Amino acid sequence: MRAAQFKRMRPEMSGAGRTPGRRRRRAGRAAIQALGLWACLLAVSAIVSAQKQNAGYELRIHRVRSPIVIDGSAHEPAWQAAEVANNFWRVLPMDTGRAKVRTDVRMAYDDHHLYLSAICYFGDVPGPYMVESLRRDWSFGNNDNFIFFLDTFDDLTNGFTFGVNAAGAQWDGLLYEGGKANLSWDNKWTSAVKTYEDRYELEIAIPFKSIRYKEGITRWGVNFSRLDLKTTEKSSWTPIPRHFPTASLALAGVLLWDEPPPPQGANISLIPYALGGMARNYGANTPTTARHDIGIDGKVAIGSALNLDVTVNPDFSQVDVDQQVTNLDRYELFFPEKRQFFLENGDQFTNFGYATIRPFFSRRIGLGGVPIHFGARLSGKLNKDWRLGVMDMQTGAADEAGAPPQNFAVMALQRRVFSRSNIGILLVDKESFSYQAAHKPPASASYNRNLGIEYNLASAANLWTGKLLYLKSFSSGNQGSGAVYAGNLQYNSRRWLLNGQMENVDQKYVAEVGYVPRNGYHHGVAAIGYTFLPEGGRVLSHGPILNSSNFFDWAGKLSDYETTLGYTVTLRNLDVFTATAGADYVRLLRPFDPTNSGREKLGAGSEHRWKYWTTKFNSRPQSVFRYGFSSQYGGYYAGGTRLNLSGTIGYRFQPFVSLAGAVSYNDIRLREPWGHTTFWLIGPRFDVTLTNTLYFTTFVQYNEQQKNMNVNTRVQWRYKPASDVFLVWTDNYNPEYLQPGQNIPGLFSVRNRAVVLKWTYWWNL
C-alpha cells in the first residue's frame, strides 16, 4: 500500500461526532485495502513459485571407511577419497566471475558425526589473516572465516550454520526465514584449525544428535561461504547476487547422500547448573545477601526433527547486559531476547508480525524480579511442509513488582505453500492467578489472549518478499477485544528496492505478552531505492533511497510523518558513507517531555515540524584499527534544535585482545522551562580471549540521561563442549561527584553490587 493512498484520507476529521455507520465504513475500507494486498501477494506467489535455482550444484557425501581425527590437518585417507567442492563464485566486492582466493571443501560422515574439511588458500595480498578475537559467534564481517549452511529438510527456509574464523573460534546458529541466522543458539560440536604459510586448514565434526533432520531423505541443501578480508573478497560455492546473504537457502546447492543419514537413536541431554553469589543494595543501605541456587534444563529429541525442551528454576545471570541508549522516543524501546531457552526455533514465535507489532515477545516472561518456576517447549518440523511450536511457562509472584503468579502458553503452527512461502497461526495466552498481597492490587486483567494468522511470501529466487497479518486480542474485564490487520510487499533485485507497507492497529488491541508500543493508528510506508554498480574505479556501489512513513490516528487524522532522502556510497575497500536529509511532523496524542528525563511536558494536540540532516561513516573491516561516526543536526520539538554526535572506535591485538568504545552526545536546545540539555552516553568494552575456550569481557556504560554508570565483568571458561563456568561481577554507580556524608570529591557512590559464580554441564544420556 503506497503512502499516497493514506494521504488522501481527510486529515481534518476527528473522532468526535463520528457515527457507528462511519466507523463501519472506515473499517470496511481498511478491510478492502487488506483484501487487495492479499490478492496481490497471492498473485505474486503463483507467478514466482519455481524450482530450486542452484539445484545443479551437487556434492556427493559418502560414509568414511577409515577414522577421521579432528586436528585441523585434512590429510587422512578418508578425505582423499571425498568429493571436492571448489571453484567458488565471487559475491563481494562484485558478484561477477570466479573467486580469486581458492577454497577446497570436502564432506563425509560415519554412524555418529557429520564431517567437513576446508582448505582456505591465501590470495596474492601479503600480510597475516585478519580476526577480531577468539570469542565464539564472532562478527562475520570482521574476521577471515569459513562458514557453511545446512538445509536439512531441503525446504529452503530453516536450517543450521557452522563455521570457524582463521584463528579457530567457533560460530554456530539457527537459520530461519530463508537466510537469517540466530547466533544465540549453542550446541555440542568440535573443530580445529591449523595455519600454514599459504593457507589455513580446518576440520569440523558435528554429532547427528546436535541437529534435526528428516530420517530417510538423501537430499539436503548445502552451501559454503568464505570471507578473505585482505582481498575484500566474499565467495560462495553457488552463485549468489551481491545483495543477498550467502546464507540464502533458496540459493544453496544440493548435498547428495549415498544412503540416508543414520537415525539418531536415543537423544536425551540434561544440563544442570549450580550457582552462588552475593549482592548488596547500597542505595537502600541494606546488608549483603547471599544467593545460592540450582536448576536443570533438559533436551529430548522426539524422532529426528522435533525437540522437547524443559527447564526447572532457570537462571540467566550470565547473559550479556543490554546495550544502553539515550532514549528520546515517545514509545517503549525494544531490546532483543538473549536467554538461551527461548531461542531455539524461537523465530516461529517471535517473528510473527512486524518489528513494532509482535503479539509474542519472550522478554515479558520472567524479567523485573519475576521468578520462572518451570517451563517446557516442543518445537521443530513435523515433516517437510509442517512446522510446530508449543511453549508453556509458569512464573511465581513478585510482590515488589506487583505481579501475581502467571502462566504463559504459546502455540504456533506453520504450513509451507508454493516454493518457500508459508501460512502461520499463532495463539498466545497469559493467565493471572489469584493475587491478594497486602499492599498490591490484583492484576487489571485475569487473562489476555491473542490469536493471529499470517501469510509470508518468499519467492524461489529471493526477489519478492511480503507478509499479510491479522491479529485479534481478547482480555478480561472492560478491556474487550481489538484487532490488527497489516501487510507489505517488497521487491529487491540487484539494483532496485521497492517496498510498500500498511498497518492498522485499533484502539482496543492489547498484547500483554507482546511488543506493540502504540495502538489506535493507521500507518503507511513506501520506499524506493536504486543502486549504481560502476565497473571500475574506487567506488564499488552508490545510490539513493527515498522513504516515506505516515501515521494517522484511528479517526483518520494525520498524527506523524517522516520523509527521508538518503544516498550511500560504498568504496571497494568497503568504507561506507551515507548522507540523509529528512522532514518530520508530529502531533502529540498525549503529553510528552522532549528530554525524556522526568521534566515538564508538551501538551497533547500540540503540533511540531522540523527538518534535519544526518551523516554516517564506517571504516573498512580489514584493518586492525576500525572507526565510525554519525551526526544529526536540525530542528526538534517546540521550535528547538537537536545535535547528535556519535562515534565508535576499535583496535585489536589479534587474536587475543579486542578493544572497542562507543560514545554518543546529544545537545538539545529548547525554550524555557527546558532550556539547554546535554546527554552523554559512553560505553567502552574490553574483550580478552586467552584461548577459544576462555574469555574475559568488561563492559562499562555511562548514561547521563539515566544518571547511572554500569560495569559488567564476565569470565567464561568452556571446559567441555557446551559446558561452562561463569564468573559475573556487576556494579551500578551514581555518577555524581559528591554524595551526602562523603568528603572525597570525585568519588562515584555505589548504588548496588552483585557477584555470581555459575557452573553448567551438558550431559548426554
Image (cartoon, grey):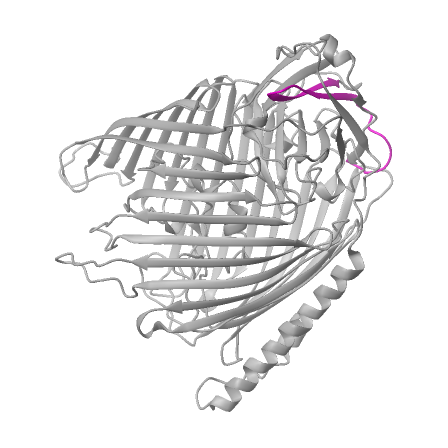
Q: Is residue 110 magenta?
A: yes
Residue 650 in percent (x, y) is at: 54, 29
Q: Is any part of residue 458 visible from this angle?
A: yes
In the rendered image, which quarter is residue 547 located in? Answer: bottom right
| Nearer to us in this view, 406 or 65 | 65
Horizontal relation, residue 705 to residue 33: left or right = left
- Residue in the image at 66% along x and 43% along y: 179
In the rendered image, which quarter is residue 48 located in? Answer: bottom right
| Nearer to us in this view, 622 or 108 | 108
Figure quadrant of the N terminus = bottom right
Q: Is residue 438 above or below residue 363?
A: below
Q: Is any part of residue 138 visible from this angle?
A: no
Horizontal relation, residue 510 to residue 624: left or right = left
In the rendered image, which quarter is residue 261 located in? Answer: top right
| Nearer to us in this view, 521 or 597 | 521
Figure quadrant of the C terminus = top left
Residue 374 in percent (x, y) is at: 33, 42
Residue 648 in percent (x, y) is at: 53, 37
Horizontal relation, residue 471 to residue 544: left or right = left
Horizontal relation, residue 629 to residue 518: left or right = right
Residue 500 in percent (x, y) is at: 67, 64
Q: Is residue 583 magenta?
A: no
- Residue in the image at 37% along x and 38% along y: 311
Tell me which segment is drawn in magenta.
92-121
Q: Is residue 569 above or below residue 296?
A: below
- Residue in the image at 36% along x and 47% along y: 393
